[in-house]
Image (tube, rainbow, N blue to C red):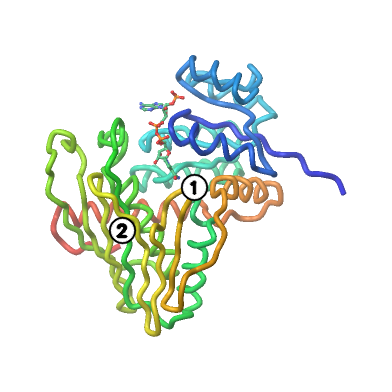
Amino acid sequence: AEVPRKLGIALVGLGQYAGGQLAPALKETEACYLAGIVTGSPNKARQWKRQYNIPDGNIYNYDNFDSIKDNPDIDIVYVVLPNALHAEYVVRAAKAGKHVICEKPMAITVEECDRMIAACKEAGKMLSIGYRLHFEPHNLQMKQLGQNKVYGEIKKIKAYNGMGDAQGWRLDKKLAGGGPLMDVGIYCVQGVRYTSGREPIAVTAKEGPKTDPVKFASVEQSLTWQMEFADGMIAECRTSYSEEMNLLRAEAERGWFELSPAYPYSGIRGKTSDGPMKLPQVNQQARQMDDFAIAVRSDRPTPVPGEMGRQDVKILQAIYKAMETGQRVEI
Ligand code: NDP
């Protein structure tokens, strides 16, 4: 049989995630490869060109990025910029006639998400969000156990995600859209959504104390929130930039199932009330990008579309409103 062509991906924004995770994963992918880069740093351009053997014609900066439309090597643009820049670059990529992967959170407002979805639709291009855990066996097992009600109806989900080392643009509300909720709390919202297969109807939230008010001048340092569901299920969630936490746990009528840690790139471990999960560790990013390339090639939907990213941003905005007003906010 004929071997299908690997699709070319261009990474936009060569920071920690692009360099530490995505580029190495693109050496293991089978349906796509690292074909190009878009960077504001000429020194990174030189280094990546050497390290990944990227031709000069496939190297762009933020000013000449739109001319990527004339480059047949690039099928997919992957936006890995600070959150507030996602919308602009996704729209420009779509206008350049490219399929798009955009990192989480999709954007910092729902209105931006709407523009991104519309631009891709108008261009006839696919849009997906970098939700790598939808390609990770333990997280898929949580979805299977929860959505198929293997332990009966879920009564409560606990989802905690926090880290202690945030810096740079992540602490700047203009670029990040918020604090740990936007960056790592979003995994809790996602985890609750795919474990239950249900959508929250309302949220309440409480900001934690600022032990470092200078560092956390423009964003929350930590946050606890609750999501309510129509059938009475409750999700208790926590996020922080000053505490390591990593849990996704569902308590159901006839048992429980949990991941701890739940969200890292590797080393995820799962247990149920019947014993440990015995599932493989995989390269999440390689699977995620291969799945999108295959979706593009075969014209089938992605399991992590822009609409999913938009719904998360909508929920995050409701959580912030609840935090600021002290009121229960309906979604
Ligand atoms: P970094 O700060 O490490 O990298 C961001 C890069 O964006 C920079 O290196 C720079 O690249 C470029 N950039 C352009 N304009 C700016 C600006 N004004 N300020 C700062 N950087 C700028 O961030 P991360 O790689 O950690 O995060 C990037 C995105 O990826 C975020 O949306 C984040 O949420 C997401 N992410 C997702 C993860 C996941 O597991 N799915 C994990 C980590 C991050 P250059 O010099 O090439 O122009």
Label located before the other in sequence (1 or 2): 1
Report the side of 168 relative to 62 (left or right). Answer: left
The residue drawn where x is 25% and y is 37% is 173
At label 1, counting other C-alpha atoms closer than 10 Å, the crowd grade (few under 14, some 14-19, many 20 or more) is: many
Mark nearer the viewer, 1 or 2: 2
The 10 Å Cα crowd at callout 2, few under 14, some 14 to 19, many 20 or more, is: many
Q: Is residue 249 above or below residue 53?
A: below
Residue occupying the point 41% across, 54% down: 263
Q: Is mark 2 within 8 Å of ligand 1?
A: no
Front position in the image: 267 or 328: 267
How far across and how far down the image is residue 184, in percent?
34, 48
Q: Secondary structure at mark 2?
A: strand
- At 12% from the left and 38% from the top, the residue drawn is 213
- Dividing the image into four equal quarters, which quarter contains ligand 1? top left
Q: Position of residue 83 (x, y in %)?
A: 37, 38
Q: Is residue 274 above or below residue 111?
A: below
Return the residue at label 1: 129
**Residue 7 as seen in the image, left or right of residue 254:** right
Q: Is residue 146 above or below residue 180?
A: below
Q: Looking at numbered disc 1 in the image, what kind of residue is underneath it?
A: Ile
Where residue 172 sits in the image (x, y, percent)?
A: 26, 34
Residue 205, located in which quarter of the rendered image?
Answer: bottom left
- Residue 118 location, x and y as percent? 49, 45
Q: Which three-letter amino acid code belongs to the residue tagged 2?
A: Tyr
Element marked by disc 1 = strand
Residue position marked by numbered label 2 in the rendering: 160
